[in-house]
Image: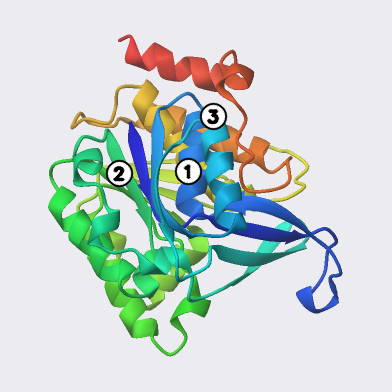
């Protein structure tokens, strides 16, 4: 089972393009990057779980019901003092921009909310950067990751949200650097890569097993142990790119699972190409649906060449 740690929340997505100031109506969708990955994995046939926290409120009820419906095992505490997280999303050219609200339940996660037995027995543990923005979640997550390092593969989506770090950008960069030192697999966008490099963080200074750089319509780039491949994007007409990076992440991890490549074996260039093609395909397909839980189900992709190639690799 692959376990995601982090935020699950409500995405209020504008039903019309334009600035949030002018938007009159929104659709309610489940979201939150780690939750999106857990749901994507489940839809792709991989056992998954989510460790998080929601409020003791109707939005929390909604999210827990939806996670159950998606087949995700939940280790999600209820917070009687803080509400479930919400985000307002505006779409301009199908590209999302966010207003993420503070003081919510997932920022109030403590050590007691991290099930040690579940995490230590996981096939992989996935996390992002949002919980680092506030205490006590920040300290609790770092403690859990330090305990897991070397026991379980750790996957990290850098997922920078500057609004949460206003006036504390140096602290944010320090926490990202700490997280990079703990991670075995890293995913980030090309804009995030440029931002880190501009601020003196070079990925070549870390010891990763796999790095994936997403470039939107420019495809993706995968790096491992000196090998580097570029994989072109799939041409689709996007409706909503909310969660596309999380769909890519879920497909990348599912690809490692199905290819039996989560161990310590060398990732060759042909492995990287197969993984990248499958992840790009799933990310592209996800943009043709509204909302972040838009990864296609395994029965809809099982006969596609990109998925069958992963199984061919596993039977070598």
Say whether disc 3 or disc 2 marks the residue closer to the N-terminus.
3
Work out whether residue 36 or residue 82 is closer to the camera in this orientation and state it. Answer: 82
Residue 130 vertical position relative to residue 127 in the rendered view, above or below: below
Question: Which image quarter is the C terminus in?
Answer: top left
Q: Which residue is mark 2?
A: 125
Q: Marks 3/2: CA distance? A: 18 Å
Total numbered labels: 3
Q: Marks 2/1: CA distance? A: 11 Å
- Compared across the picture, whether 178 is left or right of 211 comes to left
Work out whether residue 5 or residue 266 is closer to the camera in this orientation and state it. Answer: 5
Q: Which mark is residue 37?
A: 1
- Where disc 1 sits, the SS reads helix
- Compared across the picture, whether 270 is left or right of 290 comes to left
Work out whether residue 262 or residue 86 is closer to the camera in this orientation and state it. Answer: 86
Q: Which mark is residue 43?
A: 3
Q: Position of residue 293 (x, y in %)?
A: 61, 42
Q: Residues within 10 Å of mark 2 (few under 14, many from 20)?
A: many
Say whether disc 2 or disc 1 marks the residue closer to the N-terminus.
1
Residue 39 shows in the view: yes
Q: Position of residue 303 (x, y in %)?
A: 59, 13
């Amino acid at each position: 089972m692959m376990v995601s740690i982090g935020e699950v929340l409500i995405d209020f997505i504008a039903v019309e393009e334009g600035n949030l100031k002018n938007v009159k109506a929104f659709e309610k969708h489940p979201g939150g990057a780690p939750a999106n990955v857990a749901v994507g994995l489940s839809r792709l046939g991989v056992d998954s779980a989510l460790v998080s926290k929601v409020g003791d409120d109707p939005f929390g009820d909604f999210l827990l019901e939806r996670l159950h419906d998606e087949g995700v095992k939940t280790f999600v505490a209820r917070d009687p003092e803080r509400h479930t997280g919400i985000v307002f999303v505006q779409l301009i050219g199908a590209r999302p921009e966010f207003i993420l609200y503070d003081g919510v339940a997932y920022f109030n996660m403590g050590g007691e909310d991290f099930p040690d037995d579940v995490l230590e027995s996981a096939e992989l543990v996935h996390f992002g950067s949002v919980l680092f923005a506030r205490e006590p979640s920040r300290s609790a997550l770092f403690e859990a990751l330090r305990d897991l390092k070397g026991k379980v593969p750790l996957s990290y989506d850098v997922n920078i949200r500057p609004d949460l770090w206003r006036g504390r950008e140096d602290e944010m960069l320090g926490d990202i650097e700490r997280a990079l030192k703990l991670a075995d697999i890293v995913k980030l966008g090309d804009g995030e890569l440029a931002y880190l490099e501009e601020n003196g963080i070079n990925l070549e200074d870390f010891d990763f097993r796999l790095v994936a750089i997403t470039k939107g319509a420019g495809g993706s780039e995968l790096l491992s142990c000196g090998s580097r491949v570029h994989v072109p994007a799939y041409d689709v007409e996007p409706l909503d790119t909310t969660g596309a990076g999380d769909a890519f992440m879920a497909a990348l991890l599912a690809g490692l699972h199905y290819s039996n490549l989560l161990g310590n074996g060398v990732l060759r260039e042909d492995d990287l190409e197969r993984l990248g093609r499958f992840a790009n395909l799933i990310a592209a397909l996800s943009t043709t649906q509204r909302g972040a839980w838009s990864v296609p189900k395994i029965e809809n992709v099982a006969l596609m060449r990109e998925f069958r190639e992963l199984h061919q690799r596993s039977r070598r």
